[in-house]
Image (tube, helix red, strand yellow):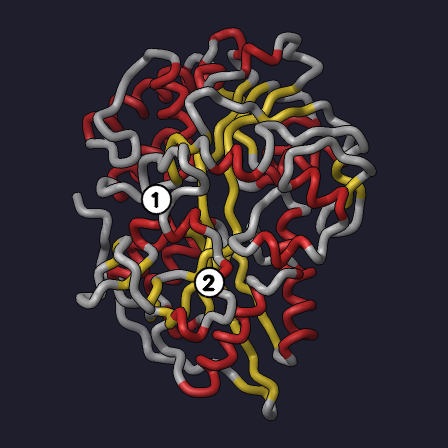
Amino acid sequence: MNKHQPAPQTPATPALHLQGRPKLRVLGTAISLLEELRLRAEQDLGIDVTFDNNDFLTTQHKAAQEPGSYDIYDQCFHNLDIVWYWRAVQPISTERITLWSEINDLTKTGHIGPNARLGQGDVPAKKLFVQPNLALGDTPSHRISMLPTTHNFDSFAYRTDVVKQPVEMNSWASLLNEKWAGRVSLVDEPAIGIFDAALAAQAAGLMSFDNIGNMSVAEIDRLIDLLETRKKDGFFRGFWRTAEDAARLMVTGETDVQSMWSTGINILNGQGIPVEQAVPVEGYRAWHGGLCLSRDLSGRALDVAYDYLNWWISGWPGSVVARQGYYISTPQRSRQFMTPAEWDYWYEGLPAKTDLPGPDGSVRISKGSVRAGGSYWQRANCIAVWNTTMDEHNYLVRRWMQLVGR
């Protein structure tokens, strides 16, 4: 079954304007729709900004079906195919992106450094550039599908007070190790959680894939059947949908090993919970966020939207997402808005010289802590697979919902 589903056409609704002060509507998720960013954008750009914050599936669905309801679509490259297929968003001119030349090569070529692992799945570089026939590809052009912004390299987390030998967590296989039965949780998002599970199953020798980034129906069935059996046996404590929910599972002592994002780890660090992100020898599951322009934008509304795009990569926003544990596509611009201790910890992989704050100003990183996996450049060179919307995505979603009980 093809992953693209027809999206009903909706009447075009122009961006609203309030007596000369533009109103920009941003559709996205909790990854980047932070109140600190909204308020600062309003201040810096002289506009009114509203955030429409939803879960992953709702955001993607709304982006494809209701292009008149937003001006900026803020999600990830792996969510792009369906939205682009239905022409819900329009190409972005790199000639209007002031710092285009400063955006790093992770999305432009897929490589940072000579020995980088490109990774399988929805590699952003393969769908960044708009081709003459409006297809997406890696041949450079002056038009792009999505402005690269926030990104990260994820794995899973474990309680260091329970796992006495950290070497046990050097493989994705740990997520399916019977030793942790009843104390494991996965993220409940099919285009993400499926890859945590697939990397674990493959590393544990339970199954293999012709292409882990684009599984067949038979491979999906086999993997979901394996997970359903584990679930019935009580292996999984549950499935979580937000970083806050993920952190809560460890705070309440329900899990020892689980899928985890940097924001969840930061929450746990801030509460003094001894947790560490694993550094799997197989490589990370990577993702890359970005900003798209609604197809309905034109004139002054389009100008305002470009101002917002340029603002996002101008420096300050990147310093905010760094305090979440995320990276930005123009890191050197953000460096000037970070203390030397912050830059050394988040980007260089060095011990924190002082306590470090999260986006809200509260202490999230304790002095002396070291980020697992090393520097940004080390982590970026160890990618196993990117978050992906596979060809059989619709089938995967149905099987996944059966698994999690939705």
For the C terminus, the image quarter is: top left
Residue type at the position of mark 1: Val
- Which of the two discs, 1 and 2, labels the residue nearer the N terminus? 2
Q: Position of residue 371 (x, y in %)?
A: 65, 31
Mark 1 is surrounded, within 10 Å at the Cα level, by few (under 14), some (14 to 19) or many (20 or more) other residues, namely many
Judging by the rendered image, the residue that carries numbered circle 2 is 101
Residue at the spot 48% in from the left edge and 74% down from the top edge: 306
Residue at the spot 57% in from the left edge and 28% down from the top edge: 373
Q: Nearer the viewer, residue 334 or 48?
A: 334
Judging by the rendered image, the residue that carries numbered circle 1 is 123
Q: Is residue 261 visible?
A: yes
Marks 1 and 2 sit apart, C-alpha to C-alpha, by: 20 Å
Q: Position of residue 305 (x, y in %)?
A: 49, 75
Residue farthest to the front, as pictured: 114
- Left or right of 270 in this view: 219: left
Residue type at the position of mark 2: Ser
The secondary structure type at the circle numbered 1 is: loop
Q: Nearer the viewer, residue 41 or 310?
A: 310
Residue farthest to the bottom, as pictured: 19
The secondary structure type at the circle numbered 2 is: helix
- Left or right of 385 in this view: 216: left
Q: Nearer the viewer, residue 163 or 230?
A: 163
Given this view, does label 1 or label 2 mark the residue nearer the observer? 2
Residue 403, placed above or below residue 291: above
Q: Is residue 405 visible?
A: no
